[in-house]
Image (cartoon, rainbow, N blue to C red):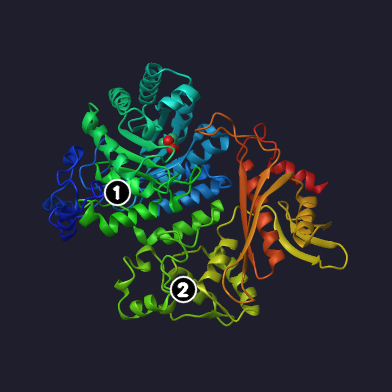
Amino acid sequence: MDHRVIAPAPGSPAFQCKLRKSPSPSPAPWKCRVLAASSSERQFFQRKRPIYVPSRIDDPSYVRIFDTTLRDGEQSPGATLTSKEKLDIARQLAKLGVDIIEAGFPIASPDDLLAVKGIALDVGNRVDDDGYVPVICGLSRCNKADIAAAWEAVSHALRPRIHTFIATSEIHMKHKLRKSPDEVVQIATDMVGYAKSLGCQDIEFSPEDAGRSDPEFLYRILAEVIKAGATTLNIPDTVGYTLPSEFGRLIAMIKENTPGSQSVVISTHCQNDLGLATANTLAGAYAGARQLEVTINGIGERAGNASLEEVVMAIRCRGDEQLNGLHTGIKPKHIAVTSRMVSDYTGMTVQPHKAIVGANAFAHESGIHQDGMLKFKGTYEIMCPEDIGLVRADEAGIVLGKHSGRHALKTRLSQLGYELESKQLDDVFKRFKAVADKKKSLSDVDLEALLSDEVFQPEVVWALLDLQVVCGTLGLSTATVKLSGPDNIQRVGTSIGTGPVDAAYKAVDSIVQIPVTLLEYSMNAVTEGIDAIANTRVVIRAENSTPVTHAQSTEPVQRSFSGSGASEDVTVSSVRAYVSALNKVIGFSKAVPSSESSVSATQATTVATK
Ligand code: KIV
């Protein structure tokens, strides 16, 4: 990271060492304007979440965390979420303590609007004992229909916010919008004014592609939207183009040169195309941004966004020493479970070496590292797994096997951060017993695989009851499946195929009868050993579904849906994943009025009972 941007706190040993190494000891001009709290101020604020006021934050070191997993994150291919899944994730984000939840893009489809409204009504009205309730935000382009839809959805929350955006880079204005800079300023001002006229007091404005926009034009448009009523100015590096030094400078220059910027909150939104989203976000925070837009696991368009867990843990680990005491209101112990939930629901697997939440993030493989860890954990760990809600496997003292009871399972899951409702625990326990009968002991990863398969699933419309396959080199692969349907009637389908999975999927299709295309199929063993549980992930596209409006592209897009399944039997695991993805398609279209959707749940049922 560029030392001029993320500079150590003055007085710290690291700062002195950096100064000696610096080729130009005088700080960049914009650096002087960084708003930092003195140490006595920091003590005074005692790291509490300040009272929420849209346009200002009374603790200068407090950074708002704006989570856009449900909006930008859901724009990842295959990451489509049903309304129920969105609500579950929003509840979990509130547990985590995010300040603002961007719950969706309400104009995208009637289902999106309903999902955002549901979150506003539920999560947006649950005030905790400290007075915390997240702001619920809806995205809109700069036009009246989008803004009205966003307001219709979020206005039910105690703290509703409209986030409206229009592109400001020359390349976007010329080729995408086909509008002059003057027209763009006019539209932005009018639409922020329109949002205000609806009664919205909390308005965020984003100049899309700010990272490639002319800074002088940014100062102008931002000054105008402040006058029109914007309370947060979000600066997106939409295509992940800038370097940390550049992005930090942009934030500082905007603060310095935009008339009225002192009376609003400046925000960052960094995409990860060059792998710099987290670094850029931190550079923005150091330069004075006090809202950071992030997603869980860093999911999002193309290469994704700055990841919440990386940004939050970087601030937590280094904020005092390197970032002038910045702090957030996030409770990191909920990070691991939130990451798991988002990964399971979106089908976006977390790579093993992903910082903070990857499977290897706290694994010490080499002998030298293990030796160091045994002597003193600080040798190779800059944070503890416990900080993010993980339990060290070797310290748990519990091995679960076929003799373990429901209570032991509940205790272990709760130690891992999962608090299940009674029915969910029953379901997981049933699966646990079935697997434990075949497998000597179940590790935490086995338990989490079962949990994903039973709990983090779309609502069950179709359920796999039985499966039988015949396959091999002699003769045709044949599969027979028995499913129970939405009416609780059991149906049996049989098919041949090129292999057992193909035959089984065709047998399922013969019952469910929703035309889909299989886009992706992958399987992995969750642990070592021949008796390991196999995890399958599929992504399908529903061929007859109505395309939805995409916030940042001009063309409507066809949604794709993921599904996952786990079993010690690879074909069962594959079929569970496929049925789960089909349930997601049905669950998603259920919330859409039938005139909007050609894959409605009712249709699927009717066809299947023929
Ligand atoms: O990347 C981007 O520019 C966005 C805006 C809508 C904030 O997602």
Residue 142 visible in rendering: no
Furthest residue to the front?
A: 23
Identify which amino acid the numbered label 1 is placed on: Gly
- Residue at 32 percent across and 27 percent down: it is 218
On residue 131, the disc is: 1
On residue 411, the disc is: 2
Image height check: is 155 above or below 609? above
Q: Is the C-beta of the residue carrying label 2 under 8 Å from the nearest atom of ligand 1?
A: no
Total numbered labels placed on residues in the image: 2
**Which numbered disc, 1 or 2, marks the residue closer to the eye?**
2
Residue sitting nearer the eye, 235 or 607: 235
Image height check: is 234 above or below 438? above
Whether residue 323 sits left or right of residue 537 in the image: it is left
Q: Residues within 10 Å of mark 2 (few under 14, many from 20)?
A: some
- Residue at 22 percent across and 50 percent down: it is 7
Q: Position of residue 486 (x, y in %)?
A: 71, 51
